[in-house]
Image (spheres, rainbow, N blue to C red):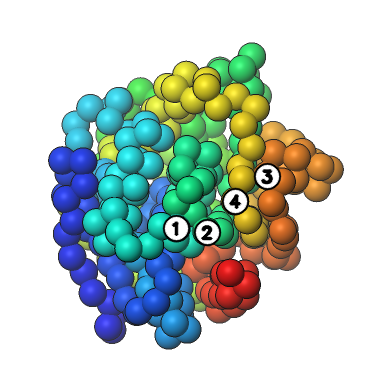
Amino acid sequence: MEGIEHRVVEVNGINMHVAEKGQGPVILFVHGFPELWYTWRHQIVALASLGYRAVAPDLRGYGDTDAPDSVASYTCFDVVGDLIALLDAIAGDEEKVFVVGHDWGALIAWYLCLFRPDRVKALVNLSVAFNPRNPKRKPYETLRAVYGDDYYVCRFQEPGEIEAEFGEIGNERVIREFFTYRNPGPLMLPKSRGFPRGKDAPGPPELPSWFSQEDLHYYTTKFENKGFTGGINYYRNINRNWELTAPWTGAQIKVPVKFIVGDMDLSYNSLGTKDYIHKGGFKKDVPFLEEVVVMEGVGHFINEERADEINSHIYDFFNKF
């Protein structure tokens, strides 16, 4: 993308690839799965033109950033630690920065605000609401009890298993399937069928208007080089994260927040999330939640599908500070 600069920053013993553009207050963009810095390409260009310095790393395990071998190297502490080290390296003169997260990046952004609210001016989070720690329920066992063994998070747990299946399907097809998934129900990946359309579906799913062949090629190339293991290892740490965050049981998010989600997003339609967001739970746990935006007819990859609207939402919110 024109004018976006790329560099490598050493953080906590790994080399992290960072894309950035613009001058002004820093906005840190945190991507999810199966994404890269590239998922923020529209936001980087737009916010840079509006007077911000947009910074979007490939998180550990993704793209051109190093991928440690150990599954245990992908906890919330490791990833938030990378982001703090990155901010120290590139924005050391700014005590606090703006943050935008999506999918797993939203989860990491919640953790960042939980652990280090002193570093965050304000947060815009997309798709994944805050998930307060329940000391009585381990997350993996809960998801398995509700959705069964075919649920994608459950299917991601055994090291090497889903990677081998993705290898059979082919990386380009895997990327296509994820980015075209628009069912608000839970994502199931049965061993016999793979993605919901099935391994033998006639031809690949058609790309949406907001996701070009060039976009598909970029993602596919990076995942061909790096593989999916790093990104999937985040899911393999959900119980470990639950154990590590015991000291934060009952803690609130104490930074200004705007939350945006599509009404077709599978995360919005799962496990009582709607009630949590709209019936007071969310506001109780995130007392400085200023606004919730539900976008009609929009799926999970909201920052790509409705880039211009998301850019405006981010600018309007951060401009208040």
Q: Which residue is mark 1?
A: 96
Is mark 4 in CB contact (under 8 Å) with mark 1? no
Give the CA distance from mark 1 to mark 3: 19 Å
Q: Amino acid at mark 2?
A: Lys
Q: Quadrant of the N terminus?
A: bottom left
Is mark 1 in CB contact (under 8 Å) with mark 2? yes
Q: Residue at x 21, y 41 (%)?
A: 12
Q: Residue at x 38, y 42 (%)?
A: 80
Few, some or many C-alpha atoms within 10 Å of disc 3 (few <14, some 14-19, many ≥20)? Answer: many
Q: Which residue is mark 3?
A: 286
Few, some or many C-alpha atoms within 10 Å of disc 1 (few <14, some 14-19, many ≥20)? Answer: some
Is mark 2 in CB contact (under 8 Å) with mark 4? yes
Q: Position of residue 242 (x, y in %)?
A: 50, 23
Give the CA distance from mark 2 to mark 3: 14 Å
Give the CA distance from mark 1 to mark 2: 5 Å
Mark seen at residue 255: 4
Q: Amino acid at mark 3?
A: Val
Mark seen at residue 121: 2
Instruction: Single out the mark in the foreground, 1 or 3.
Output: 1
Give the CA distance from mark 4 to mark 1: 11 Å
Dot 1 or dot 3, earlier in sequence? 1
